Amino acid sequence: MSQLESVIWHVLGYAAMPTIFIFGFIGVAIGCLLLLNWMGVETIDTDA
């Protein structure tokens, strides 16, 4: 394996974990919002 290939694989390897974490967090957040919307939960009016 050339030096360039080694650098590319290291960059991909180190970038994989934060990417999985961020997209997992976004996915769970969107899933929770859709579930709450589907269940008909209303927001709390704090301007009272």
Image (tube, helix red, strand yellow):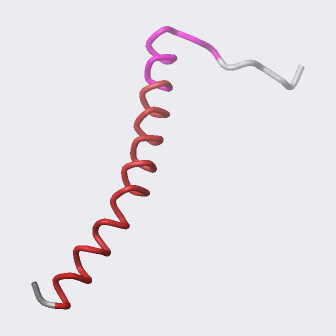
Furthest-front residue in this view: 1
Q: Is residue 31 magenta?
A: no
Position of 41 with respect to 16 (left or right) is right
Furthest-left residue in this view: 1
Q: Which is more toward the observer, 2 or 45?
A: 2
Give the quadrant of residue 10.
bottom left
Position of 39 with respect to 46 (left or right) is left
Q: Quadrant of the C terminus?
A: top right
Q: Which is more toward the observer, 19 or 37?
A: 19
Q: Quadrant of the N terminus?
A: bottom left
Q: At which x and y percent is residue 12?
A: 28, 69
Give the quadrant of residue 47.
top right
Q: How many marks?
A: 0
Say which residue appears at 12% left-offset and 89% top-offset: 2
Q: Is residue 40 magenta?
A: yes
Q: At which x and y percent is residue 36?
A: 51, 17
Q: At which x and y percent is residue 33?
A: 50, 26
Say which residue appears at 58% left-offset and 12% top-offset: 41
Furthest-top residue in this view: 39
Furthest-right residue in this view: 48
Q: Which is more toward the observer, 9 or 21?
A: 9
Give the quadrant of residue 14.
bottom left
Q: Is 35 above or below relative to 6?
A: above
The magenta stretch spans which residues?
33-42
Per the picture, the main secondary structure of the magenta-coloured stretch is helix
